[in-house]
Amino acid sequence: MIESDLLRHIYSRTADLSRFGQVVVGPGDDCAVLRAPSGDHLLLTVDQVVEGRHFEAIADPSKARVLDGIGRKAIARSISDIAAMGGTPTATLATACLPPGFPQTSADELFDRMHAWALHWGAPLIGGDIAMGPDLGNSAKPPLLLTTTVLGVPHAGRGPVLRSTAQVGDELWVTGRLGNSFASGRHLSFEPRVAEARWLCSRAGAEPTAMIDLSDGLGRDADRIARASQVRIEIDARLLPLHPDCTDRRRGVSDGEDYELLFTASPGSLAEGASINAVPLTRIGRIVAGPAGAVIRTDTGLLDASGLGWDHADPRP
Ligand SMILES: [Mg+2]
């Protein structure tokens, strides 16, 4: 089963959540949105990292630098989902399933690093659980698994920024640069765009109309905004802001784990060449009427964007 099929299965089981008044937004966005009895909204997201899929198999668990990168990524992915809603992270919960024989000192170091990174983004680790995986004898060793839940609060003025509210006529923008995240190691060191999302949401009258963080590649994630909003997104391949070490435009569209923000905004609400804290903002497309989905305009014609991306349940590319 691939991730998109599994998510569809989950959504089909939770279609009647509207009768639960506390669930404002259920599955299908970067975070769920809950209404507390006080009326305030809360953001919740959960994600996992799996050894051998989201990070390389650990050759030496005594290496603090390796554990730091893994712990950082486990926290940062969920922090990025809070940013994708325009929110501020507030607290973190984490669980680990360790391979049999994983040293206690390494487990302590891993959780110390996760705690430090959670604090770094203002969302202290407030609970969790650790289990040891089964020893399967001669079979292959089970991988290290980390699961991270982050809670957050939406921007007080803008409220949660959903995927489903892009408007025909909007422009499509992206923060930072795209492509080559795995080979470069940026998938372990990316900076979740929390401050940038907050800045965007603070511009009264010019806030993002819809937003997502780029976990699975620009093509696939743009298609998610398009389908959730029932609009057509046209991306201009010539406008993509690629990292200097990514020379192939197709990889700028299809590589996963850039963790930049992709958002829609009213025309003219952002100036060409704008940046936030030296992070560039680039207009890469527009929202038009038409069949829901994202397409990419290239020198040779239009490409369907929906299959151009990385499915986290698929084997690594
Ligand atoms: Mg996301």
Image (tube, grey):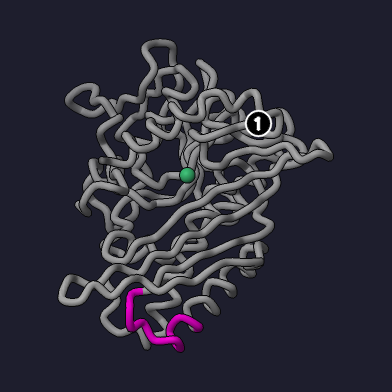
Residue plotted at (40% across, 18% down): 232
**Could you say which quadrant of the image residue 21 lies in?**
top right
Q: Is residue 293 magenta?
A: no
Residue 172 falls left or right of residue 2: right
x, y percent for residue 60: 30, 84
Query: In the rendered view, would you say 250 is above or below 234?
Result: below
Answer with the quarter of the image where residue 16 lies: top right
Which residue was labeled with disc 1? 24
Q: Position of residue 256 (x, y in %)?
A: 33, 49
Give coordinates of residue 252: x percent, y percent: 30, 45
Residue reaching furthest to the right: 38
Describe the element under mark 1 as helix, strand or loop. Answer: strand
Quarter of the view holding residue 73: bottom left
Which residue is painted at 63% across and 42% down in the image?
A: 86
Q: Which residue is at the front of the view, 134 or 78?
A: 134
Can residue 95 be seen at all in this image of the molecule? yes
Q: Is residue 268 visible?
A: no
Magenta extent:
99-108
Q: Nearer the viewer, residue 84 or 105?
A: 105
